[in-house]
Amino acid sequence: MDKKDLLRRLPKIDDVMRQESLVMLAEEKGELLVTDAVRDVIAGMRADILEMFDETAEYYDTSQFEAANVAAAAEERLAEQEKKKLYRVINATGTILHTNLGRAPLCKDATDNVAAVSQGYSTLEYNVSQGQRGSRHDLVGELIKELTGAEDAMVVNNNAAATMIVLASMGAGKEIIVSRGELVEIGGAFRIPDIMMQSGAYLTEVGTSNKTRISDYENEILTEEEAEEMDWDETPRGMTRYATGALMKVHKSNYDIVGFTEEASLEELVALGKKHEIPVIFDMGNGLMLDMSEYGLNEPNIPASLATGIDVMLFSGDKLLGGPQAGIIVGKKEYIKAMKKHPLARAMRVDKMTFAALEATLMKYRDPKLALRDIPVLSMIAASSDELKAKAEKLADAIRDKNHDAVCEIVEVEDQIGGGSAPSVRLKGWAVSVQDGGKSADRTERKLRKAEVPVVARINEERLLLCVRTIADDETDLVAEAMKQE
Ligand SMILES: *Cc1c(COP(=O)(O)O)cnc(C)c1O
């Protein structure tokens, strides 16, 4: 057979579409996409034939022209096209809040509630008992107040948005005093000085990189009258100065300053704020609700920080709170009320799916034991060394079952919180170190990423590590499956 014969015998789209499998598929996915897939498969064959040498044509396997085979190829193609860009992976890195892997995994109640609320209509802005319009701000407001002791609360898209609206609402046209040791970059373009500029507030830096005293803040405070009377040539570099709008503390969430250091405490700032009638803002970032010091996590928590008398405090929903991406602002009613009315509020408001996940997550905190058991981020932090060791042994057994070449060893590792939180905390954990036949760690790591549910592993000193702290119990079999012999 020569190339011309082959081209003539190429299958016809209509013939292929009559295959029963495709008739059913077209019913489900619509004619259009299925026909396109068949057309693409046939076009691929035509291009192959046109490109090949005449001698190759003689040996061409024409069984691929059969309608059933073209249909199967089209089905595969369609499945490939339908593969989502955003899909589940297994985190075997031992880093709990892995920023690239979506930060906090949600608890089951949260995902159930998202499905229940988003598949139909909901009470997003409707008060069922009164049969009239409600406010989305009220959905989790009461719960947050109960859990944190705050007077009022507001939820926006993330903590970056929260920072923006807090500064715009409390500091536009005024100066906000921040320590030079706390001018944080959270990642990418999010830097406190830049966000301050965008908000219309003026940053006044005080202290030094390693030491800032409460007197540094006090010396910089300007009243309205003082700011008005100030001559431009009295100010550094002749800059205009504005009245102080707030004192702000930013938690050093993603770095530590060690050595010869000093910083003003929340209590000192609150006392200074009271004395001068200036509000105090605390960007605490991580959203830790419970005291987790017994698990090695010595971070400030929300209720304790608020109890110092802070006026406004803000944090992320998807860091140590263990909920969906959100920015939560809590504090004195007068300030939060103004934020809810601020024009930016609409641009930052969150969707029903976020509220659904957040409400279900927050409810767990009504009993701290439930929160520790059911919120994945917290249960991963609280997991004991014995539990993790047993989990690692179970995983090693499951891998040996699937792959007789794999040599598994249980090793101790240091896990991390991640997500720019508690950078110096190391959690003692366990991992399965795998030698997959004669393969290099890099090659095994690639194989794991290609699995049906990809597994993201850690490589340490040429060893492939599967850290079990971040592998959910029901994922063990999937990891073993990904490790099966090639
Ligand atoms: C993480 C963090 C932010 C940014 O929060 P996102 O929710 O990621 O937008 C801001 N400030 C501090 C102190 C943080 O730790």
Image (cartoon, rainbow, N blue to C red):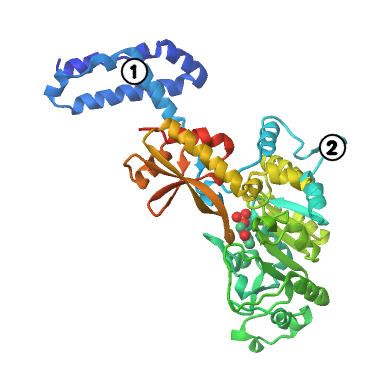
Residue 132 position in % (x across, y down): 84, 37
* Amino acid type of the residue tagged 1 in the rendering: Val
Badge 2 is on which residue? 132
Task: Tell me which residue sits at (82%, 58%) in the image.
Answer: 333
- Which badge, 2 or 1, is on the more N-terminal residue? 1
Residue occupied by mark 1 = 70
Badge 2 amino acid:
Gln
The image quarter containing residue 199 is bottom right
Q: Mark 2: give few (<14), some (14-19) or many (20+) Cα within 10 Å.
A: few
**Could you say which is closer to the camera, residue 304 or residue 356?**
304
Task: Specify the quarter for ligand 1.
Answer: bottom right
Closer-to-camera residue (31/81): 81
Asked which secondary structure carries label 2, the reply is: strand
Q: Is residue 201 above or below residue 235?
A: above
Mark 1 packing: few (<14 Cα in 10 Å), some, or many (20+)? many
Position of 481 with respect to 309 (left or right) is: left
Q: Residue at x 70, y 62 (%)?
A: 300
Q: Quadrant of the N terminus?
A: top left
Residue at 64% in and 44% down: 376
